[in-house]
């Protein structure tokens, strides 16, 4: 997890601590870090198992979603002093394996989707908004039939204008959907989406920069868009980046990044091995994926897709995707952009290993593992 205040000068990260426990750290320059992990006694659990999301409308106003070790409960935590102290804003879910997504466009306007659809179905998902910095929350209608598992993607550019990307259900091998709202989530409209060549188009959550929205799309070219039960199909994936300046009413496509990343598709599973795409500005985008040989391959543009470089990635480990697409490791490599020079790559070699995050401060040439135990406070 990484969230920033909208500039490269501040960020909040979730990392692995000295004893393998999750910790939160803040940084102003991605060279020096300070630990700001909330005390677990804020909630009725002896420890936190992970931090699953967060948002930072300013460098002092921080929101984090924490989960119990077995992921059966979640909480929304809030800090107004840069993480030096935290309070429990509200529970996020209770059940078997819930989800939550939080987004604040400024200190006052925020949006929260939370619930446990795994335990109780889509009726367990709740959508709420606040206009007073989280003091009160107002329920917002959630059109479940089109926003199934909304926690898979939610972004707001302002207090009223936002985007939602419903998660693809396991077993689905069809285009995902992009929805927009201009009334703070009261109503949603399917956004005009550019045509892409390929049987499966997977949208990432748009990143909003002022009046601009950047939408990464992974286009999977599989032999079959919906393989028969038990049959695995392999194909390649390209990346398309679209840009909108009118809230998603229209999009301008950048030149296609033809990566040829190998992905697998099997009925009843998610596409395995798709590239991870992360913008840090309207013109800067990082891409990472694992090749069949396990090498972490990188792409970077700082000029709006006019040209792409291939950073060498010295120091990154191998990350061979598991052979079974039903594995929980659907994306063994993920990247979180900070700027054109700084980025974080998280690598998970297989379903039985813990993911490890690596930081670059030189444009992707060299990477170093980051853990709370090795960071300079």
Image (cartoon, rainbow, N blue to C red):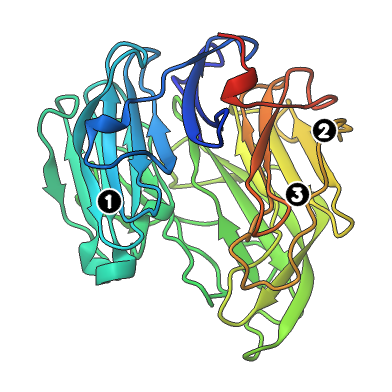
> What distance separates the C-alpha of mark 3 from that of mark 2?
19 Å
Q: Is residue 286 left or right of residue 282?
A: right
Q: Nearer the viewer, residue 357 or 300?
A: 357
Residue for badge 3 = 289
Rendered view: 1 above or below 188? above
Residue for badge 1 = 114
Callout 1 secondary element: strand
Q: Give the residue drawn at x 79%, y 70%.
A: 235
- Where residue 254 sits: x, y (%)? 69, 42
- Where residue 201 sits: x, y (%)? 61, 63
Badge 1: few (under 14), some or many (20 or more) residues near its Cα, within 10 Å?
A: many
- Where residue 190 sits: x, y (%)? 38, 59
Q: Is residue 285 left or right of residue 2?
A: right
Q: Visible in this render: residue 57?
A: yes
Question: Reading the chain from its start, which is encountered first: label 1 or label 3?
Answer: 1
> What distance separates the C-alpha of mark 2 from that of mark 1?
39 Å
Q: Give the residue drawn at x 17%, y 56%.
A: 141
Badge 3: few (under 14), some or many (20 or more) residues near its Cα, within 10 Å?
A: many
Q: Nearer the viewer, residue 192 or 170?
A: 170
Q: Nearer the viewer, residue 303 or 230?
A: 230
Residue for badge 2 = 307
User: Depth-wise, is mark 3 or mark 2 nearer the camera?
Assistant: 3
- Where residue 214 sits: x, y (%)? 55, 38
Rendered view: 87 above or below 234? above
Callout 2 secondary element: loop
Quarter residue 46 falls in: top left
User: Depth-wise, is mark 2 or mark 1 nearer the camera?
Assistant: 1
Quarter residue 84 falls in: top left
Rendered view: 77 above or below 266? above
Badge 2: few (under 14), some or many (20 or more) residues near its Cα, within 10 Å?
A: few
Question: Reading the chain from its start, which is encountered first: label 3 or label 2?
Answer: 3
């Amino acid at each position: 997890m990484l969230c920033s205040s909208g500039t490269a000068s501040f960020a909040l990260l979730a990392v692995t601590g000295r004893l393998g426990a999750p910790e939160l750290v803040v940084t102003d320059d991605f060279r020096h870090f300070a630990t700001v992990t909330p005390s677990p006694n804020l909630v009725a659990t002896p420890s936190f198992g992970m931090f699953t999301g967060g948002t930072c409308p300013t460098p002092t106003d921080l929101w984090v979603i924490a989960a119990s070790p077995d992921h059966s409960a979640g909480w929304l935590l809030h800090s107004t002093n840069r993480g030096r102290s935290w309070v429990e804003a509200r529970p996020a879910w209770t059940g078997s394996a819930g989800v939550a997504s939080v987004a604040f466009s400024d200190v006052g306007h925020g949006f929260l989707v939370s619930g446990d659809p795994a335990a109780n179905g889509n009726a367990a998902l709740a959508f709420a908004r606040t206009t007073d910095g989280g003091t009160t929350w107002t329920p917002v209608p959630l059109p479940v039939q089109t926003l199934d598992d909304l926690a898979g993607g939610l972004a707001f550019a302002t207090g009223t204008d936002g985007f939602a990307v419903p998660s693809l259900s396991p077993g689905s091998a069809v285009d995902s959907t992009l929805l927009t709202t201009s009334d703070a989530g009261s109503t949603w409209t399917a956004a005009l989406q550019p045509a892409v060549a390929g049987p499966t188009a997977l949208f990432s959550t748009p990143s909003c920069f002022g009046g601009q929205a950047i939408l990464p799309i992974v286009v999977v070219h599989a032999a079959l868009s919906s393989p028969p039960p038990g049959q695995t199909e392999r194909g390649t994936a390209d990346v398309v980046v679209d840009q909108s300046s009118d809230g998603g009413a229209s999009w301008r496509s950048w030149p296609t990044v033809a990566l040829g990343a190998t992905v697998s598709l099997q009925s009843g599973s998610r596409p395995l091995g798709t590239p991870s795409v992360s913008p840090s500005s309207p013109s800067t985008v990082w891409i990472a994926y694992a090749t069949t040989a396990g090498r972490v391959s990188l792409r970077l543009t700082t000029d709006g897709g006019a040209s792409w470089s291939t950073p060498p990635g010295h120091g990154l480990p191998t990350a061979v995707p598991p052979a079974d697409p039903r594995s929980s490791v659907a994306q063994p490599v993920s990247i979180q952009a900070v700027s054109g020079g700084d980025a974080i790559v998280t690598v998970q070699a297989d379903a039985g290993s813990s993911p490890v995050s690596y930081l670059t401060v030189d444009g992707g040439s060299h990477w170093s593992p980051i853990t709370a135990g090795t960071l300079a406070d």
